Image: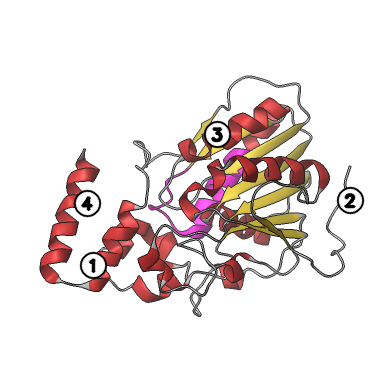
């Protein structure tokens, strides 16, 4: 209820000011689902109990989201036979390095408690940057495969355009300020992938205002070009928007396929464009 009142107030304020940047900030806010009720503590959904599965998947949500946004994906992974650690972390409160150290470590601890021998990662948006940030400093010996959904691997031009707008830092926190494409961009400073990585990018936008800041095609928050990363093992685009890509049925099936085979499926009834990359890097593991 408080969020609805706040959005209504900001929207009326933006109209009165006739300020395009305020309208864009409100548009960005309205596109975000409700935040986690407990944003001051990092929690792990489904970390209790033990599983007979030898493979665990750590799920990391995006900026200003919660573990609830990854619930459908987590449930599908569990039904497939994976143990899942669906991490909830306060994405707007701390810096990217702090969030990476906390959230990724919690996921690894959860998988270890459940007896997993192999740990995979599936992320949405900024969650993928947390994985890259963590691996920049700390190797994971039993790392399996990583699937990133709509990651701003090269930063987002939306941040460049709006970071100095009143209200942007309030909505996106210190981590969000570092997701641009300029010299201060953390994603652009992390280097190429040196791990088994598949990337899924969206091509449909429901936020046409923010899309004006992005090169086509884009998903309303991240462009297809920005999602790509040197060293990735496979890449596909899907006609899905940024806020919903992790809940899309076809995308979930592609995630499961990649975790199992190390490649995305080339057979699909949905609008999916397959990337034809160069020779696979040595860290890309063959299909099992």
Residue underneath mark 4: 7
Residue at the extreme left of the image, as rendered:
16
Distance CA(mark 4)–CA(mark 1): 11 Å
* Residue, disc 1: 22
Image marks 1 and 3: residues in contact by CB distance under 8 Å: no
The magenta stretch is 89-107
Q: Is residue 91 magenta?
A: yes
Check the image and report above or below for 53 versus 130: above
- Compared across the picture, whether 243 is left or right of 201 comes to left
Label located before the other in sequence (1 or 3):
1
Numbered disc 2: secondary structure: loop
Q: Which residue is mark 3?
A: 72
Give the label on residue 286, or none.
Answer: 2
Say whether residue 121 is left or right of residue 30: right
Residue 70 location (% of width, % of height): 53, 39
Magenta stretch secondary structure, dominant: helix
Q: Of helix, strand and loop, which one carries label 3? A: helix
Classify 56 as above or below 63. Answer: above
Q: Residue at x 45, y 53 (%)?
A: 63
Q: Earlier in the sequence, mark 2 or mark 4?
A: 4
Task: First in sequence, mark 3 or 4: give its number.
Answer: 4
Compute the Cα span from label 1 to label 2: 49 Å
Q: Is residue 161 magenta?
A: no
């Amino acid at each position: 209820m408080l969020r609805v009142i706040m959005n209504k107030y900001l929207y009326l304020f933006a109209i009165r000011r006739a300020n395009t940047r305020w309208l864009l900030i409100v548009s960005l806010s309205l596109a975000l689902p409700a935040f986690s009720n407990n944003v001051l503590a990092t929690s792990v959904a489904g970390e209790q109990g033990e599983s007979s599965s030898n493979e665990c998947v750590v799920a990391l949500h995006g900026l200003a989201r919660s573990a609830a946004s990854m619930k459908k994906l987590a449930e599908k992974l569990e039904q497939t036979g994976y143990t899942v650690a669906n991490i909830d972390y306060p994405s707007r409160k701390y810096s990217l390095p702090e969030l990476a150290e906390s959230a990724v470590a919690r996921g690894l601890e959860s998988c270890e408690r459940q007896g997993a021998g192999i740990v995979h990662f599936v992320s949405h948006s900024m969650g993928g940057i947390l994985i890259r940030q963590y691996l920049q400093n700390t190797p994971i010996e039993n790392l399996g495969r990583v699937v990133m959904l709509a990651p701003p691997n090269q930063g987002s031009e939306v941040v460049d355009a709006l970071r100095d707008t009143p209200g942007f830092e309030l909505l996106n926190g210190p981590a969000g300020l570092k997701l641009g494409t300029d010299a201060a961009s953390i994603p652009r400073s992390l280097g190429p992938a040196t791990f088994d990585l598949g990337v899924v990018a969206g091509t449909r936008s429901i936020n046409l205002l923010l899309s004006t800041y992005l090169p086509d095609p884009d998903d309303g928050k991240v462009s297809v070009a920005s999602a790509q990363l040197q060293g990735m093992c496979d890449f596909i685009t899907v006609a899905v928007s940024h806020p919903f890509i992790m809940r899309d049925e076809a995308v979930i099936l592609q995630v499961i396929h990649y975790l199992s085979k190390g490649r995305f499926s080339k057979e699909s009834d949905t609008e999916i464009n397959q990337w034809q990359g160069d020779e696979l890097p040595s860290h890309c593991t063959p299909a099992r």
